[in-house]
Image: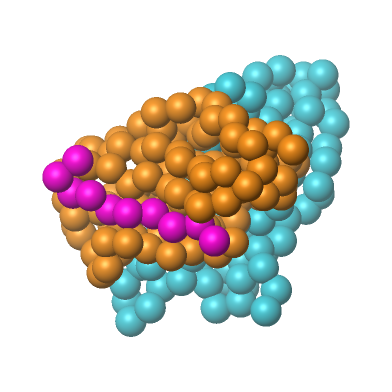
Chain colours: A cyan, B orange
Amino acid sequence: EAGVTQSPTHLIKTRGQQVTLRCSPISGHTSVYWYQQALGLGLQFLLWYDEGEERNRGNFPPRFSGRQFPNYSSELNVNALELEDSALYLCASSLVSSGTYQETQYFGPGTRLLVL
Amino acid sequence: AQSVTQLDSHVSVSEGTPVLLRCNYSSSYSPSLFWYVQHPNKGLQLLLKYTSAATLVKGINGFEAEFKKSETSFHLTKPSAHMSDAAEYFCVVSEGASGGSYIPTFGRGTSLIVHP
């Protein structure tokens, strides 16, 4: 069974640019979570999508946005990049079983973004 | 509200000696608890999870953790460290299954260093 995949693996952008990161969940998983792992700050929750809807959002500015597609894959968009957006962006997926969200999350390898 | 504290930012052991990574949690519900491992430049891999069944949980690669409600702890142990265990370890608490938020809270991580 294929795990969570993310693309690209690495990205270099300059301040003010926009970036799109992509995530494909494990087959059968409908929930997708996005996290930012910046140096020294641990994992910070960004966004949660399920069934195409945004279910929850972390404490990040509106220039962080995303969406989930009918096939449950997801995109994270970051506009007007700032230097402090440099981080590893992790995507995770989880299962919904019998109408109940399952708490176990399975992570992808991440996309490392460097903003110069 | 939920929170998790990893008591050591770094733990250093010799190969073949026991490993103890400490985690305390706080929760208003009956939480689920997880340990994840992250090797350099990789995503997070699930080591084990506690979801209100047996209090002693066995995970992959010889790791286990014991849930102690009276001490609000969920420490991770391994009898004998291997060089390949060197990585960052995250303790995670989630309250979703017991009525709280499905957004997990991650500890700040413990870096395990293994000396030959």
Using the image, determine if residue B108 lies above or below residue A77. above
Is A101 on the left-hand or right-hand side of B45? Answer: left
Q: Residue at x 66, y 63 (%)?
A: A4
Provide residue B43's location: percent of width, then percent of height: 66, 49
Is B23 on the left-hand or right-hand side of A32? Answer: left
Provide residue A16's location: percent of width, then percent of height: 75, 21
A63 or B64: nearer the eye? B64
- Residue A113 visible in the shown view: yes
Q: Residue at x 31, y 72 (%)?
A: A100
Viewport quadrant of the N terminus of chain A? bottom right
Which region shows up in magenta? B62-71
Q: Residue at x 65, y 19 (%)?
A: A84
Q: Residue at x 32, y 76 (%)?
A: A99
Find out whether residue B69 is within the magenta segment.
yes
Viewport quadrant of the C terminus of chain A? top right
Find out whether residue B17 is within the magenta segment.
no
